[in-house]
Image (spheres, grey):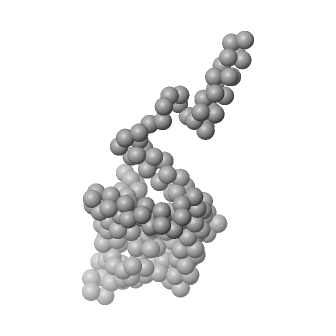
Amino acid sequence: MGEQRGTKSRTARSAATGSPHAPAGPPATGPAHVAFVLTQVGALAAMGFAEQLTPLGLTPAHAGLLRAVAAGPGRSQQAVATELGVLPSRLVALVDELEQDGLLERRRNPGDRRHHALHLTAEGEARLVDIGKAARRNADAYLAPLDAKEQEVLGQLLDRLAAAHALAPGVHPGFRALGR
């Protein structure tokens, strides 16, 4: 009987909350709830993007590095590491991986031979197009519950939050955690 009561209780909670794992009680509201839901949906979007990159043999960090190099070809590893907020030693490892895959190359900087300039290869440029397609597939699936106007409003609100918190445009803050 106790098991039946426990099952009924879980079933009732599941029906009320829509999830068998949701805590009992009224739905959360307020700023803490909004911040938590932002982390939930952000993590879901990031996981979806990572899944889209898997067939390309890339991680989100690889994609971010390729994008950064494409945005400013010929910059030094140090400059790219600073832009991304990643430890230079961790960036070197990422560059090594992408160089081995033929997507990125280091060239001697003619102005300062102590530094290497980073450039995409032709294959790296092609892979960047594939990354863009993967990102679009992920965005389309992720944002499908919202109509075009809602997506636009959400984008504007998120841009305001990102700007208010001084997030670098186009740079995922997760790079800061790499290698730390």
Closest to the observer: 72 or 81?
Answer: 72
Give percent across and percent down for residue 22. Answer: 55, 34
Question: Which residue sits at x=44%, y=74%?
Answer: 67
Is 47 on the left-hand or right-hand side of 28? right
Give percent across and percent down for residue 141. Answer: 60, 62
Does 45 sit above or below residue 22? below
Is 2 on the left-hand or right-hand side of 147? right
Question: Which residue sits at x=52%, y=77%?
Answer: 128
Question: Which residue sits at x=66%, y=19%?
Answer: 6
Total residue callouts = 0
Closest to the observer: 77 or 174?
Answer: 174
Which residue is most to the top?
1
From this viewpoint, is residue 126 visible? yes
Is 47 on the left-hand or right-hand side of 179? right
Which residue is most to the bottom?
110
Question: Which residue sits at x=41%, y=56%?
Answer: 174
Q: Quadrant of the N terminus?
A: top right
From this viewpoint, is residue 89 visible? no
Give percent across and percent down for residue 11. Answer: 66, 28
